[in-house]
Image: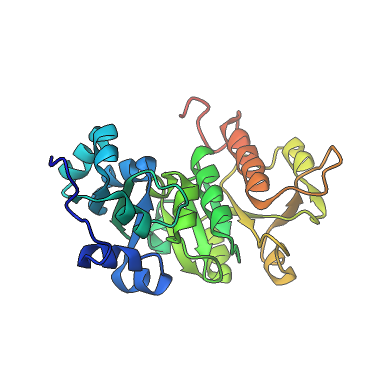
Amino acid sequence: MPATPELISPRSARVSAARRLAKRNFRGKERLFLAEGPQAVREAAGHTDTLVELFATVDAAERYADIVGEARASGARVHLADEDVIADITTTVTPQGLVGICRFVDTPFAEILTARPRLVAVLANVRDPGNAGTVLRCADAAGAEAVVLTDASVDLYNPKAVRASVGSLFHLPVAVGVPVEEAVAGLRDAGVRILAADGAGPDDLDDELDKGTMGGPTAWVFGNEAWGLPEETRALTDAVLRVPIHGKAESLNLATAAAVCLYASARAQRASGGCRSVTES
């Protein structure tokens, strides 16, 4: 590997093409997006036929030689670049020296239904990319089989959403652009119970757990950060549950509430009588 950068000028055609992917319309046109930082690049390199190109500073290429090696092995083109070039491509204040260009990885909603998922997160009207990425990460950690972003939600490939997912974007199927009515109807037809998470819900999550009714296949519908779920969406679901507030906090933010709800389902599903084996990892 050369000791000096190959791509010096931010005006390089490859650099310009990468920089454009910070904008949604270019991402959609090219069906490519940016994965910034070592964790995201490592996960992308391990995801079949996903990583197309990798830009790395000399220092990062040495520090993360294993990741650069994985990128090369995956067939990605690797370019050494000046730090100013990396800073020009990324949207972070302090870039970590690695930026990958990846192919879109979303999954058709029909494929998710065919797989008969047992735990799903549905993001309805979620507009904040950081929240969307964090919910995706929570769903991955809780063992969900899929995430669905409705047609009114933020772009899955927004750089902030990709960063917030911390690589989970590459771990589980994610469908995008699905109308909420279609998402609910499809999941219900697949035998999935639909629960809405709403701070003003009439039923309490703890009470629902005590009833022993949460061990079956479940989809959680999470709404907009500021105004929650509209009544018409709540009406589509089988139950509207609130996370109990035992202290003096006014509320929970979206990602925190999603983590609580998803883990509640995961625990119930792994208990005796749940839809997952107790010994399943």
Q: Which residue lies furthest to the left in this view?
A: 2
- The N terminus: image quadrant: top left
Choose between 63 and 242: the one closer to the eye. Answer: 63
Image coloring type: rainbow
Whether residue 186 is visible here, answered yes or no, is: no
Q: Residue drawn 27% across and 45% down?
A: 57
Percent x, y of residue 231:
74, 69
Whether residue 247 is visible here, answered yes or no, is: yes
Q: Residue drawn 24% across and 51% down?
A: 81
Choose between 24 and 233: the one closer to the eye. Answer: 24
Choose between 156 and 106: the one closer to the eye. Answer: 156
Percent x, y of residue 191:
54, 54
Q: Residue drawn 16% across and 52% down?
A: 6
Percent x, y of residue 123:
57, 59
Q: Which residue lies furthest to the right in this view?
A: 248
Numbered label tally: 0
The answer to whether residue 109 is above or below residue 168 is below
* Residue 219 placement, left or right of 25: right
Percent x, y of residue 140:
48, 42
* Residue 102 placement, left or right of 179: left
Q: Residue furthest top?
A: 279
Q: Residue drawn 64% across and 57% down?
A: 222
The answer to whether residue 13 is above or below residue 76 is below
